[in-house]
Image (cartoon, helix red, strand yellow):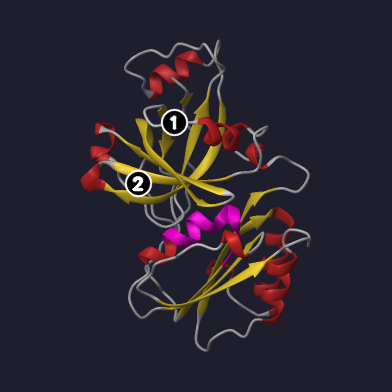
Amino acid sequence: MRSAHAMSTVTTDTHRNRRPGRIHVTTVRSLRRITPRMIRLTLGGDDLSDFDSNGGDQHVALYFYEPGVELPRPFTSDAARALLPTAKPRLRRYTIRDHRPELREVDMDFVLHGADQLASGWALTVRPGDEVIWFGPSPAYPVAPTTDWTLLLGDETALPAIGAILAELPPGHRVLAAVEVADPAEEQPLPTRADATVTWLHRHDRAPGEPLREHAAALRLPGGTGRVWGGAERAVMRDLRHHFVHVRGLDRADTHLTAYWTKGETQDSEV
């Protein structure tokens, strides 16, 4: 049986939804291609009966052990720590795309960076019934609006979080969302009750982040007070943070821009 296993230390801040995370032992119930470059795994099990979702952009940490490592049962946080001297796993972070407590299952989306990458390579070979152990959830960006409008920006790595945030925003809240993807085939439905305008930015042969930078520079923001959430390459997020805080004059507390990956490093190395 193929396995992915998870535990992580959760960091918090005062502006994020916080419920303590813990280890969850689940199995793959189903998988399907959302787009040519993205797979959605549905994970379920009795263990999720008491999963406390933080909503929004919450993520969990998957543990990948070397083949042949035997895990003690039950597999708990204490058991994972006891294994560290002899079996140290590699961690990979993924967003909870959807949570259905009545079915005791969650969805996670995996961008396919290549079969040679740890997590995306695993996602290409995993099958229903395979075990997945993960720790979470992390604190999450609060979706209850405290401003007149919300701007969401990101590339495909942030698309699961953008989808989760859109799904939770209340009816009538003004939202502008811009998502950079490789090409039109990577677009996907993003259901929401909010008053949302979603713009798809097709990268094609351009460098990652260029369409996002150009879109942000030309964007006309709504009136009133607003907040910005974003996720993409580290340098891109740094540039957008400077743009919105120092050029557009938004309060830094209302500008949450997170590095989801770093140029020159494999995306799976981001922990």
Please name whichever residue, 152 or 84, is drawn nearer the observer in this view of the structure. 152
Name the spot of residue 10 as percent of width and height, x first. Answer: 47, 40
Prevailing SS of the magenta stretch: helix
Please state the horizontal and vertical placement of residue 80, each as a whole percent of the image.
Answer: 44, 20
Amino acid type assigned to the residue bearing label 2 in the image: Arg
Drawn side of residue 212 relative to residue 254, left or right: right
Which numbered disc covers residue 19? Answer: 2
Q: Which residue is mark 1?
A: 127
Mark 1, secondary structure of its residue: loop
User: At 28% from the left edge and 33% from the top edge, which residue is drawn?
Assistant: 45
Kindly identify the amino acid type of the residue bearing the numbered disc 1.
Arg
Q: In the current view of this chain or complex, which residue is farthest to the bottom?
A: 223
- Is 221 left or right of 209, judged from the image as shown? left
Counting residues from the start of the chain, the first of labels 1 and 2 encountered is 2
Could you say where residue 91 lies in the image, as x and y percent from the top left? Answer: 56, 32
* Quarter of the figure that contains the N terminus: top left
